[in-house]
Amino acid sequence: MTQDELKQAVARAAIDYVVDGAIIGVGTGSTANFFIDELGKIKHRIKGAVASSEATAARLKSHGIDVLELSDVDAMPVYIDGADEITAQGAMIKGGGGALTREKIVAAAADKFICIADGSKLVDVMGKFPLPVEIIPMAQKVVSRKLAALGGEPRLRMKDGKPYLTDNGCMILDVVGLTIANPAELEAQINNIVGVVTVGLFAQRGANVGLLGTVDGVKKLEF
Ligand SMILES: O=C[C@H](O)[C@H](O)[C@H](O)COP(=O)(O)O
């Protein structure tokens, strides 16, 4: 099976978590895109969706799914999104696609986080994938120094020869070399650096369910 087929399989499995008549939170990335395509097939069952990025909003709309502003939503039972890495405890690294801040906000508004990923994303200790940190542009140097003091090596994310900018107009530092022994503690520590908008560690509020695509089928983890 290809990686795309594994992503498609978990996207299909995630449809079981869609609550009829409710508003659903939708993540960003290639796995979330497969989920949106599946959601399009059952769009009559939901009231609408809240998107975690402009790209996700556009894809939802292309399927004729109503996209609501989070500020207009009072209840959201489920948020469904991918991850760059996930542990057996449900902690994740996210933000490879640059949508970490809105993803964390939409996830925080949902009762349950369902993480969908191909099985290669499951790790014992996170940190092989560079940790994305969204920052206010003027804080680039000062935040970089603080991240280096934590043992990391921050690299400014670039796109087409220019700093990559998020949907929020902010920059991203991708940090390699950090020891992520205690994800929740590191999340708090990095979020506490002045100039940081969001760190892509989702540990204080991790996933409730993980659906992981393997050659033997979709493996379900509950946290
Ligand atoms: O910013 C992007 C998100 O956090 C994605 O959920 C994450 O990068 C995983 O993406 P993919 O499903 O493409 O591997």
Image: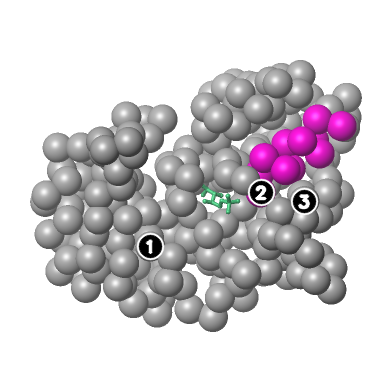
Q: What element carries label 3?
A: helix
Callout 3: few (<14), some (14-19), or many (20+) C-alpha neighbours within 10 Å?
many
How packed mark 1 is, by other alpha carbons closer than 10 Å (few <14, some 14-19, many 20 or more), is many
Residue 168, x across and y down, in percent: 37, 30
Seen from the viewer's position, the closer of residues 202 and 8 is 8
Tell me if the residue at label 2 has its CB under 8 Å from ligand 1. yes
Taking the image as drawn, is residue 59 in sight?
A: yes
Could you tell which of marks 1 and 2 lies nearer the N-terminus? 2
Residue placed under numbered mark 2 in the picture: 31
Residue 165: % across, % down: 33, 34
29 vs 64: above or below: below
In this picture, is 11 found above or below 76? below
Alpha carbons under labels 1 and 2: distance apart: 19 Å
Residue 22 on the magenta segment = no
| 55 left or right of 142 in image | right
Quarter of the image where one finds residue 88: bottom right
Residue tagged by mark 1? 130
Q: Quadrant of residue 114?
A: bottom right
